[in-house]
Image (tube, grey):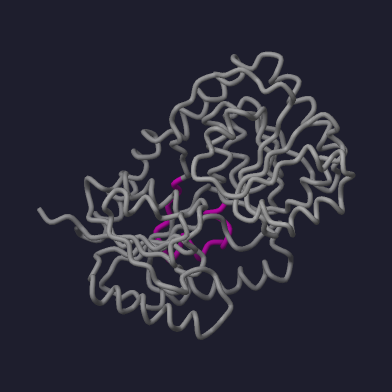
Amino acid sequence: MTLPHIALLGGDGALSGVPRYIDHLARALDPVARISIVSDIDRGGYAFAAARGVPHTQIEGLATSVRPLRILRAAARLRRFIAEQKPDIVWANARMTQPLARLVTPRDVTLVLTYHGVPCGPGHGALRSHISWMQEQVAQRLSRPQDLVFLTPRDSRAFGPVTARRHNVHVLPNCSDLGGFAPNDPPPDPQIVMLTRDARQKNLDAAAAIMAHLPDVRLELYGAGTDTQHLRDRFARALPPEALARIAFNGPVEDVRPALRAADLLLSTSRYEGLSISMLEAMEYGLPIATTPVGGTNMMGATHPMMRLIDTSEPDSAAQIITAMLGRFRADRTAQQTAIHAAWEAQFSPPVWQAGALDLFGQITRRAGF
C-alpha cells in the first residue's frame, strides 16, 4: 500500500508555535503518510526535521511579508516544489502559505489549511480586522472546497456561514509534549515567566506596566526579541531601576523546561492568540496562568484549575489578581501542580491530540478517496 504524500507548509523559520505544531503533526501522521516539510529559511524552528530525517525544503519568502516581488518569487518556488514533488495533500499552516497554497496548488491535490488563530477580531485593530475578514470572505467564496482546520470552535465560526457552506470544517486544538514534569520546590522569591516574543501581538509593554505594581516579584522573559536593547529601553522608560532589576531579558531558548520549573506562574499579555502552545506547556508543567481573554482561553479555562483573565488596561487590578494567584499557588505548590498537570493530561496531552489528528486525517483521506 502506497502512503499518501503530505507537504506540510510552514512560514517563518524561527522558534514559534507553528513549527512545533508541524512537528506534532508530522510525528502523529508518520505511520499513515509520507511527510515533507516546507518553510522559509530555517532559524531553529525546523531543526527537528533534520534530526528525525524528515525532508525539509526551505523557500525564502514564506514568512509573512508585504513585499510583492518577494511574495511572487516565493509563489513561483512553491509552485515548482509542488510540480516536482507531486504531493497528494498540501497542508498550509502559516499566514503567508495559506494564500500561496490556494494560488498554486493544482485542483487534483487535496488542500488543507490550519488557522493558528484568525486574522480578525478583538486585538487586531478595527480597520485591519475588517480588511482581513473581507479578504478571507473573498478567498473562501472563490476558492474550491478545502479542509479548514481551526484550533477552537470559536475560531471555526469567525468567518460566518460561508466557511461551513463551502468547505469541510474541523477543530483540532494544539498540544504540548515537553515531558519530564514532576512537582518541584518553589523559587525563593515569587517568579513569573513569559514564553513569548517581542511583537505587537504579544504586547510586552503591558507586562512592564503590570510589573510596576508587583514590587516583590521577578519576571523572566524568553523568546525572540526578548534580549534586545530596544526592549530593555522600553521597559526602562516604564519602570524605575529597582523594578527593572527584577526583570531578566533572556532571548530565545530551545528548551523551556528549566524556565517553567523555576516559575510560579505564566503571564500572557497578548492582544490575540489561537490556542497558545506556551500556555499549554505551562499547564503541562503545572503552572497557573494569568492571561488576557484571547483565543482558546475559554477552552483551557474550562479545565485549568488556576487560570485567571486579566485586563491589561488596568495593570493595578491585573497585579492584584496575579498576587493572589501566586499566594495560593505557593502555599500548596505540589498539590496545585499535580492538579493542573492532570487537567492538561486529560485534554491536551500527546496521546489525546494524536488520536484527534489521526481521526482528522482519516476524514480528509476518506473524502479524497485515498
User: Is 89 left or right of 170, judged from the image as shown?
Assistant: left
- Outermost residue toward the right in this view: 240
Depth check: give the residue in front, 206 or 105. 206
Determine which quarter of the picture holds residue 103: bottom left
Determine which quarter of the picture holds residue 5: bottom left
Depth check: give the residue in front, 43 or 176. 43
Residue located at (50% from left, 53% from top):
15
Q: Is residue 326 magenta?
A: no
Residue 222 horizontal/vertical position (percent):
62, 45
Residue 6 horizontal/vertical position (percent):
28, 60
- Count the labels in the image: 0
Residue located at (80% from left, 56% from top):
233
Residue 255 horizontal/vertical position (percent):
50, 40
Residue located at (81% from left, 40% from top):
211
Image quadrant containing the C terminus: bottom left
Residue 99 horizontal/vertical position (percent):
47, 73
Depth check: give the residue in front, 285 or 352. 285
User: Is 350 left or right of 152, judged from the image as shown?
Assistant: left
Residue located at (69% from left, 62% from top):
124
Determine which quarter of the picture holds residue 46: bottom left
Location of residue 346 with respect to 176 vertically, above or below: above
The stretch of residues the image draws in magenta is 155-172
User: Is 243 left or right of 69, judged from the image as shown?
Assistant: right
Location of residue 196 with respect to 257 vertically, above or below: below
- Outermost residue toward the left in this view: 1
